[in-house]
Amino acid sequence: MRQQVILDTGAIVALINRQDQHHQWVIGELATIQPPLITCEAVISEAFFLLRRVRNGIETLKDLLDRKHVQIVFQLDPEVQIVTDLIIRYNSVPMAFADACLVRMAELYPNSSVFTIDQDFLIYRKNTNQLISAIAPWD
């Protein structure tokens, strides 16, 4: 089993949307991961938006949250300065708000991996200069 897994939007969408090009890869990876997966509200917001046109997408995500397979553990208020500093630091990428929250979560959970399909996590660093462990199709 892996350490704590931080869930990104793309992995959620690929899990729920059978038409997504990464769907089978995500299903295979999830077989090796012990729930719960943790995330932030920004990721859940993005996922609900992107799943609005996917058949049963909203309901499936709601069920993952209801069953605590995905848990929202990140509290923005005490981390807002660090999150916004990350967005400024990676302005040239540019860094999405949700990605900044996930990078901060990777700092708060040092033995974690980010489950993502977003190649920007090859660029982002936690604690200024440390690689972020990722469960990703390029890994």
Image (tube, rainbow, N blue to C red):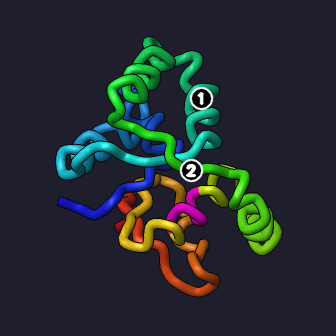
Whether residue 19 is visible here, answered yes or no, is no
Q: Amino acid at mark 2?
A: Phe
Upstream in sequence: badge 1 or badge 2: 1
Residue 104 counted in the magenta span: yes
| Frontmost residue, 21 versus 11 | 11
- Measured from the top left, where is residue 3 in percent x and y? 28, 63
Q: Residue at x 68, y 51 (%)?
A: 76
- Measured from the top left, where is residue 1 in percent x and y? 17, 59
- Which numbered marker is on residue 50? 1
Q: Amino acid at mark 1?
A: Leu
| Frontmost residue, 125 versus 127 | 127
Q: Main secondary structure of the magenta part?
A: helix
Q: Residue at x 78, y 65 (%)?
A: 81
Where the C terminus falls, by quadrant?
bottom left
Horizontal side of residue 78 vs 139, given as left or right: right
Q: Residue at x 77, y 64 (%)?
A: 87
| Frontmost residue, 105 versus 18 | 105
Whether residue 62 is visible here, answered yes or no, is yes
- Measured from the top left, where is residue 84 in percent x and y? 79, 62
Q: Quadrant of residue 24?
A: top left
Horizontal side of residue 82 vs 123, given as left or right: right
Residue under pointer 2: 74
Task: Report crowding for label 2: few under 14, some 14 to 19, many 20 or more residues within 10 A (C-alpha).
Answer: some
**Outermost residue toward the front in this view:** 78
Q: Which residues are magenta?
A: 102-106
Tell me if residue 30 comes above or below residue 68 in the rendering.
Answer: below
Horizontal side of residue 54 vs 81, given as left or right: left
